[in-house]
Image (spheres, rainbow, N blue to C red):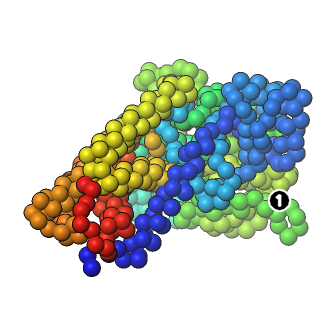
Amino acid sequence: MLNQTPFWKYILVIFVVALTALYAAPNLYGEDHAIQISASKDAPVEQELADLVESALVAENIEIKRIELERGQLLVRLNDSDAQLLAQDIIDRKLNDDYVVAMNLAPDTPDWLRAFNAEPMKLGLDLRGGVHFLMEVDMNSATTKAYEDVVGDFRLRLREEDIRYRSAKQNPDSVDVVFRDSATLEKAQFFLRNQFGNLQINERDGLTLRATFSEARLAEIRDAAVKQNITIIRSRINQLGVAEPLVQKQGADRIVVQLPGIQDTAKAKEILNATATLEFRMVDGQNDVRDAQRGRAPAGSEIIMHKDGYPQLLKKQVMLTGSHIIDANSGVDEYGVPNVSIDLDSKGGAKWSRATKDNVGKPMATVFIEYKSTGERGPDGKLIFEKKEEIISIATIRGQLGASFQITGLDSPQEARQLSLLLRAGALIAPIQIVEERTVGPSLGKENIELGMTAIIWGLAAVLVFMLIYYRAFGVVANIALVLNLVMIVGIMSMIPGATLTLPGMAGIVLTVGMAVDANVLIFERIREEIREGRSPQQSIHFGYDSAFSTILDANITTFLAGMILFAVGTGPIKGFSITLMIGIATSMFTAIIVTRVLVNSIWGGRRVTKLAI
């Protein structure tokens, strides 16, 4: 008999609707005003901290909704923004600078939904409020750092090949290596050209070889600096608990950072401006640091202060930078001594093995380097940064090291944990500076959400009323499909990692609500035509769905392709609109073709029908 639905289609519809409804549900619970507390330096986030914060707030009569300790962070949920402001001030005074304390908006998702990893939709800056930063990368530092690495590589490789040289020094835009005679220079030139194909190595006057990067290689270095900084910025933003930050490249040397939901711009700037890197250097044990302090420092060494306040003499040559570290984890050895296990990439492993081969048993220092903006610009218009260096640990090299090794000599497990966090965060290839800052208040975002929801509700209501009046019983089926379509859009948007709802995205949903009914109109009108041509109700339903399918498919595919093009070539708001449009097209086809067919077959299929209410 016509219009019988296979059992698997019932299962499919129930499964898809239930799944999307489950992941759409967290959007009903809203957000809490919260204070987020993260570790800073040597201060752990543990239950004792939660108890301390709770007692401090209770003493000041601040009502706490609840306190959560998870993923190494403490989240204090409060009832309103006034309590949030007071709580931040109290916690800041209580904890001083030992922790990063930031105001935030935290989803109030119930535990039973969290068990399914269900979270509300990520809202963009225009809906949720937050901060927008435009950051500029110091490209001069990026190229300078690349030439520093070249100097170190030249010294190592020439030493390994037993090619003697007078000096190897770095210039602003080149590296010069001076030799004793022309025969050695020719041998070195042939060797270095074979080993360093990305460098242009040419002979200069005075038995000198000059190495420079090609323009193509310099462009790669600058592009890599921006990309690596983007990766590290994302890692640092995790400290702020931002659910879906936007971090993307703009132009040749700038990065756009948008942090929806962040209310404490000072803390956001503090974390983003923490421009730092790591270097491993050998300790100069052959010379006295006191002589160096008197102005008699050896040519290849310099004084750097230890974090504990005493001076230490280190070799200037950098053995390895943090840019080669891919993983770092703290732990203890068989004697209970804290250490940090480090994994390097292939290039870093090979370089590290060569660098440590001749230094077994000697002390090595891990140097933490931070760049701070002076607020001034040079003649070229670029930002000027002040470099600050500090030794964070000194350890002894126990053997020739490869791609995996351990740092020992640490004072405590907490120091090991902090060092592993710094290493995992990676090294910024070049310092960055915030050059533009904008704040979007949550009240504006709330107004946008309310206006957008009003448009969606009124648009949906108008369509529902029209379908109910014009198509009667079949209109009820279409209306059920439209409501399910909206639930599915919200559920899928909540499920997709990286999908963010913006104001243009809400416009896409409004448009989708209007478009979603088109397929039902085509089907229902075709059913009417079949009835007018004298077919039975069952035949009319069957041929109505089958005949309208190709038209519906063609129309939706062309619109979907337009959405894909908008997503590919558009930016920001255009992408937000295209994402919701494409999701809406997919869900509307599912609900209009499959869901309504299942409902129609369940009501009218498989039985004798003399007249259809359509």
Query: Which residue, as the protein is rendered here, is positioned at the far front?
Result: 610
Which residue is at 49% across, 26% downward? 447
State the quadrant of the N terminus: bottom left
Percent coordinates x, y for residue 537 in the rendering? 22, 66
Q: Eyeballing the image, is 595 above or below 281?
A: below
Decide: is 14 above or below 244: below
* Rendered location of residue 132, percent (x, y): 50, 30
59 left or right of 303 in image: right
Residue located at (89% from left, 35% from top): 55
Q: Nearer the viewer, residue 41 or 384?
A: 41
Circle 1 residue:
338
Q: Which quadrant holds residue 51?
A: top right
On the image, the x and y values in percent for residue 167 come to 54, 47
Left or right of 44 on screen, residue 478: left
Q: Nearer the viewer, residue 178 or 604?
A: 604
| Residue 184 visible in rendering | no
Q: 24 above or below 50?
A: below
Q: Nearer the viewer, residue 470 or 133?
A: 470
Question: From this viewpoint, is residue 245 visible?
Answer: yes
Residue drawn at the location 73% of the way across and 38% of the way down: 77
* Quadrant assignment, res 288: top right
Please indicate whether residue 163 sits to the left or right of residue 577 in the image: right
Q: Residue furthest left?
A: 533
Q: Quadrant of residue 540?
A: bottom left
- The amino acid beneath tag 1 is Pro
Q: Secondary structure at mark 1?
A: strand
Q: Pick the quarter of the image with the C terminus.
A: bottom left
Q: Position of residue 348 (x, y in %)?
A: 57, 60
